[in-house]
Amino acid sequence: MNKKRIVVFTGAGISAESGLKTFRDSGGLWEGYKVTEVATPEAWETDPQLVLDFYNMRLKQVRSATPNSAHFALVALEKKFDVRIITQNIDDLHERAGSKNVLHLHGEILKSRSSIDPTLIYKIENEEIRMGEKCSKNSQLRPHIVWFGESVPFMDTAMRLASTADIFIVIGTSFNVYPAASLIDFVPAHAPKYLVDPQAADKYSLKNTVIKREKAGTGVPDLVKNLLI
């Protein structure tokens, strides 16, 4: 008998409880930086060292963070369900907790890639990406991150995954940012849907939808406990 499939969509809120500041919070990582200075292709062309400094700081923070109770609760679901995680987060906390199937929509901070060929991707072996480090085609390595103004390469894959969900769970995002917010439109109408976030949007009062306005660290373990019964 095939396991039911749970597709989980996670945002910054689940990582915030591991101490990783979110981009849009007051006091978050964007403070002191304009988005246009550190997170666009134009920023990279203008001042690549500033961009590297910004993401190397984030890389250091991610490496010092640890998974929290929400991450581990999702791993527990794999005992009973076929769990697929789609995340907007660039950290590796899902993987470190033990999740086996994770799709990163916005890239991965622990990887670098070629500036001229996005298919050339490398694990960052050193403390950081440095100017002068080049890919096999002799171009400077850049963060393996989807910047503002760039396409989201795995969006089609995420939409297909959402369409296969027997249960769909949204964690740590208000689900107001597109194109990722459109994923819920691809979930089968009959599939139960759960939104776990203190700021969960009211507009998703869809059929078969339960909204839990709680932080991930408490709301997710409680939800998982009920799903495993």
Image (spheres, rainbow, N blue to C red):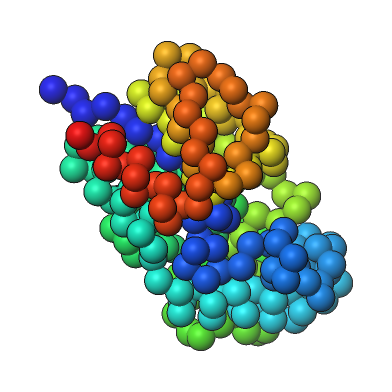
Q: Is residue 97 left or right of residue 216?
A: left
Q: Position of residue 196 (x, y in %)?
A: 49, 42
Q: Is residue 178 among what the camera can see?
A: yes
The residue positioned 84% from the left and 67% from the top of the image is: 34
The image quadrant of residue 165 is top left
Q: Which residue is drawn at the image coordinates 47% and 29% (left, top)? A: 210
Question: Which quadrant is home to the C terminus?
Answer: top left
Relative to 157, does residue 115 appear above or below in the rendering? below
Asked if residue 70 is positioned above or below residue 171 in the image, the reply reads below
Name, please, the residue furthest toward the left. 1
Q: Is residue 30 left or right of residue 42?
A: left
Q: Nearer the viewer, residue 13 or 97?
A: 13
Q: Is residue 122 visible?
A: no
Question: Where is residue 225, by image quadrant?
Answer: top left
Give residue 45's position: percent from left, percent from top.
82, 68
**Residue 31 locus on image (x, y percent):** 78, 71
Q: How many numbered marks are there?
A: 0
